[in-house]
Image: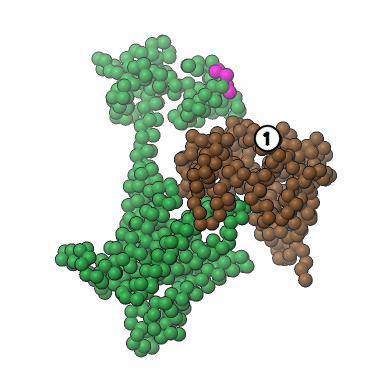
Amino acid sequence: MRIEAKDPVVEFHDLTVSYHKKPVLWNIDMTLPKGALIGIIGPNGAGKSTLIKAAMGLLPLGSGFVRMFDQPLDKVRDRVSYVPQRESVDWDFPASVMDVVLMGRYAKLGLLSRPRKADKEMALNCLRKVGMEAYVNRQISQLSGGQQQRVFLARALAQEADLYFMDEPFAGVDAATEAAILGIMQEMTAQGKTVIVVHHDLQSAAEFFDWIVLLNMRLVASGPIDKVFNNDLLQETYGGKLTVLAEVGELVKKRQIPSREKY
Amino acid sequence: MDTFFEFFSFSDPSIVAVVIGSILLTASSAVVGTFTFLRKKALVGDAVAHAVLPGICLAFILSGTKNPFFLIIGAFVTGWLSLVLIDNITTRSKIKEDSAIAIILSVFFGIGILMLTHIQHSGNASQTGLDSFLFGKAAALVGKDLITFGIVAVILMVTVSLFFKELKLIAFDMNYAKSLGLPVKAIDLLLTTLTVLAVVTGIQAVGVILMAAMLITPAAAARFWTNDVKTMTIIAATMGAISGLIGAYVSYVAPAMPTGPWIVMIISAVALLSFFIAPKRGIISRAVDQRKLQYQIMDENLLKALFHLGEKNDDTYKGRTAEEIIEKRHFPKARLMSSLKRLKREGFLKKKNGLWAFTEAGRIKGQRVVKLHRLWELYLSKYVKIAADHVHEDAETIEHIITPEIEAELERMLEYPEMDPHEERIPY
């Protein structure tokens, strides 16, 4: 079941993505609405992270395209922000909380220039929003999981974007952080910004999001929560693994076949 | 000793030149190496270092001179080629990166040694000294060579400082850098180029075989001293410079001695020292922290035992003998006595007529440990659903590390319970 967004910000068109040559997402077609808090839901290995990585141009596309604000990503990068999975970086890296948040300003600064005073104040503002202003100079390895996630969120906020892709921002965070992050997201969407979140907990998904994307190697459903968050569709997403689809994916990897024939 | 003063008075201009050269080369390798290290590409550095040898030999065979300009170009070409090959092997075959590095390193170095042997037996008079590229010879850094290598070293350091923030970001979070639209591939290419160039310039002082140590060891040592990339780069450069200086001295005192091994030994000694004595991250500092934690656990257990003794007859402040305490809970006598004395010194206990008793502060501390122990037991049985007879052991360790924030959270969640799972009163 696929419901088109009335005021679309992101458009996925016939997107197929392979990971290490193994197709993990097949023919994703959907539009996502402006100003919504959108949850991408699905079981492990459904390709949730892959979908937003592909959208951010971090993975090569097998076929199809993604458009944001009706433009290719490269034209509107300054309006789009990405929050990677917390575990994707080495938190023992020699950097302070301030260093990490300032990274959100790098695109605005451009090459060869250093963060200015205004950038530092902006970073501090963002840290204040996520309740981490007391940790400005803290070494990042000394943060708890929830605090690390808040720092990542602050870094994304420092980009001052209109569209946010977040990979599992609620994974492994404490209750207080969860509430804080959700509060910020709701504030952002109230301002007309769009927040797209990879999420794995069904129970909280029902409370958090306005719009749900159900994913399991293919698009099961996309639409307002009251239309798509029902037993039948969840059953279709979580129940019955698409064994044949997964097996064919393995085959494609073994035989090294490109997912689209090229002449 | 005479040579020492002769050297370090820097009165001889040729000494000054060698010193400046050595310092520039080792410091610039350390600066570039900081990012090789942060990117976790130490082995790649080693492969490049070995792979420049055939390039140097080839350049010599083709040009017939030891002109550093040609040698740098030759070294650069094969150094680069090795990286491209490693990359291709990894992406296009099932061979993993570590194996690809090992293969390329040995093949390139093998070819290099073959060529070097051939040159040495060719009878070409101008080849003498080419073998100093194997283990380095700082004293050979004179005249035009020095200027060429020195300029490259300065270019390296300036480039790193220009792209500092991008290099840092890519080392920390490459996907995020890409999502910002930064030219990650180009900057990656830049870092690779810098690494190859650092190797090429460093080999005059250190030699191809040990060059990887010059890239990585200063950074690894510097990491112990700081949590900031900029400071780390500066410390690494300083450490590199010191080893370069001493290397130059050795080369001056004993011209027959290769400099590379000396420089590497010095920088390794610095790294080893950092490993032990650095604050916070060093082994000694960590051992001290562990020791403090052991004392804390012993002291808290003792206060807890005293509190338990007082619970029975509601005589918390009564003085007790060491034997009474041991009877309540077994402690090795010597450790108990030292703990008792420590707690008295800190004001948590007082001693009267050979009896040990709580001060007010001591009672509060002991009571808190007992409370945390019982709260944790209750939490485990109520929320984690662990059987009541299994929660005690866990609580024995957890009671020492619970922070005031978690304490408050536990009290709130459990709503200030009165009894623990063993029907013992939780003191507030």
Which amino acid type is shown beneath numbered disc 1?
A: Gln
Q: In this view, does B313 lie above or below B369?
A: above
Q: Which residue is drawn at 61% across and 65% down?
A: B91
Q: Residue at x 43, y 65 (%)?
A: B155
List x then y, in percent, for residue B47: 47, 68
Is residue B121 shown left or right of residue A114? Answer: left
List x then y, in percent, for residue B289: 37, 38
Q: Which residue is drawn at 29% across and 69% down?
A: B18
Q: Which of B358 and B305 is in front in this view?
A: B358
The chain letter corresponding to green is B
Q: In this view, does B371 lie above or below B268?
A: above
- Does the rendering let one see residue B169? yes
- In terms of image quadrants, where is residue A182? top right
State the quadrant of the N terminus of chain B: bottom left
Task: Read off the residue under disc 1.
Answer: A186
Q: Which of B137 and B66 is in front in this view?
A: B66
Q: In this view, does B420 lie above or below B33?
A: above
**Magenta segment, which residues?**
B413-417
- In terms of image quadrants, where is residue B189? bottom right
Q: Which residue lies furthest to the left in this view?
A: B2
User: How many numbered circles are shown?
Assistant: 1
